Amino acid sequence: MPTPPQSSAPRPETPPETSGGIKAPLTRRFVIDAWRFFKARRRDASLRLRPEIARRRAALRADWAARLRALAESRPERALALSRRLAPHAPAAAAAAAILTARLEGWAAAAQHFAGLAPGAEAKTAALLLRRGAPGPGIDLAPPASDRPADLAPDAAAGLVVYTTRFGPGARVLPALTARAGIRFLVLSDRDDPAEGWEIARLALPAGLDAGLAEEFARIRPEAALAAAAPDAEASLYLAPDILPAGNLDTLFTRWLGPQDLAAWRHPRAVGWQDLAEGAALAAVGARRDVVLAQARDAEAAGLPRDAGAIDSRILWRRHRTPAALALAEAWWRAFARHPGDADLALARALQGPAPDSTPPPPAPRLLPAALGSSTDNLFAAAMPARPDAARAAARKPGPAPGPDSRRGPGAGRPKIAIVHALGYEHYAATLLRGEQLAGLLAERLAGCDITYTAEAEALQGHVVVLTKWALGTRKPAEIAALRAKNVAVIASWDDKIPEPEIVACVDAQMSLSIRQTIELNRRWPGTPAFFVTHHVNRLIRPGDPPSDRLRTGYFGEPINTHRPASLAGLVEMNAIATTRKSDAGWMDALDRYNCHWSVRRRHPFDGAKPFLKGFVAARCGAVVMVARDDGDTAYYLGDDYPFYVGALDPATLEADYLRVAAAFGGPDWRLAQAIMRQVAARSADEVVCAQFRAMVEAVTT
């Protein structure tokens, strides 16, 4: 039989079902399942190892930084050679080369290396890596008053001025959170628009002085800068524009500043003038950098010691008519006028002399102790980052921008404000206090404002919308962005809820309930400003007259939120509050039975910021508090020498602290604590809350 002809075309691949039966599909299925299992195990391992990897990477970075710093200290020539080789490829290395050249070869040789640098993160990195140890010596520490009055006397307050400056169209003034009756809070400015808590005054410059030096003139020469606006001022506390006044002013003035003619904080990042010059030269640009380099060459030629300490002049106390203050102002201004670059560097030059005309150096300010904190973050003030202007901040936010008719300027009519709560959360204490009661308080006291309390946020249009804690928690970012598109502004009120970055990006501002939270939010999100609005005291609580026979202590709150040793069970009475039931108000009937409130907090991992509300309640009732010094805003209100801080949270220490308070009852420490609590009551009054809320609304609508 003949064989059929063979085709040259390739044969089609035989399907697995006809060639291998079910073996091939099972093999493929096995491989797929094995691959998925492997990927899942790899993902799980990655998730488990991620914290450890991050920790090791951080350790490597820290080790690298420590090695570079050690190399710069032990073998600076080698560090300089290495940084010069890397400079063409790494901006941070170029900045390091400039710094090391200044240290090894002098500032004249370093000028060409600084010339091509741009200020930025790389320059800051280099300055950080090459920082020379801890801040410098104390020079002359400021001793506190041995026996201070609790309150600043009215006549003493009348002679004091707290002042700052605001020059240029983009300049701003931080709110005066600690404004106290009797003390003038003054802004020296070139314009008249208002600032929260401050009085505005125009600065008259001496004839022939460049207007660009107005801020430095006001800082260096207080007796001349304040001559027109405050001619009777005997002393002043200067705050730089980036310093937020936050703490207890009575404590600051009566305990720390009052005994001194001159006082300041040591510089947080400088051991001496060399460090000041390095930081200023890296930060300056253009002609200003040339002037700073001239300052550095002048200090170098004068033979100033490099490790003699440095002062941060952003917070500076002076008694104007004392010889020490007058001599300092004169010498400092002469040093600055020769090379008008960096004010702190000029101050170091004036203090460490000698002056070109052989004038002896003036007395140096006494330095406040490090136990109070640094000049950038202490019990009385904190440095804040620069805030972008409103137009740039709004342009960066996702979602639809507000329509042209929704924004308004000053005097555009009766502002409409809506406090928004969440349905289903009306029974929570947070909704009652920061929602319902706050809306009622504002409706009574904010004349000219239309206040609405509602859960129907989507129906609002043309309002300033404040989303309370649970209103934020029940809405997605897209919903909040849509709400913002229809209204003047949307403000997130987090209360003690941990902020969510996705929501922060969708709002115009944040309303904070604690000073510490205000500082943290502004540092983390400078483009979405946070405004402090004091947590008001429950409106059902009235001022009281506590018992005066002996110490009577009570705790008000959820029992899980405090530390109370069993041994104190019969001495510290528990008055439980259910924060999820606003109708639970029986505890208020017990307030007048106590003259001391136990406020020792137990922290939880889920806790966000906490206000000093227990302290506000105690102050409203005329009682003192026992509280931990580092609990939230405590030290901002009570100061550093409040007598009834608890030392630790262990039972033995709490027992000893309670007995100490019992022994102090009715004595000098008791009276001091009562006076400080009266200051707390003044700072948490209803009118303060309303003024802060009004200032917030004005800031976000203009």
Image: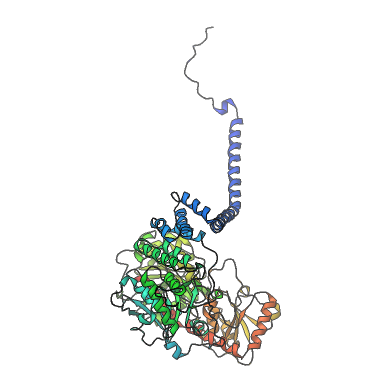
Horizontal and vertical percent position of residue 410: 31, 74
Residue 182: image x %, image y %?
A: 43, 87
Q: Residue at x 47, y 53 (%)?
A: 93
Quick one: which residue is furthest to the top in this view?
A: 1
Percent x, y of residue 265: 49, 74
The answer to whether 400 appears left or right of 558 in the picture is left
What residue is drawn where x is 63% and y is 73%?
Answer: 560
Of 642 and 133, which appears nearest the observer? Answer: 133
Is residue 360 placed above or below 126 in the rendered structure?
below
Apparent side of residue 492 relative to residue 578 in the rendered image (left or right)? left
Q: Nearer the viewer, residue 29 or 526?
A: 526
Residue projecting furthest to the bottom:
549
Relative to 622, does residue 353 appear above or below in the rendering?
Answer: above
Which colour assignment does the render follow? rainbow
Report x, y in % for residue 629.
Answer: 58, 76
Residue 51 drawn above or below residue 568: above
- Relative to the observer, which residue lies in front, 509 or 632? 632
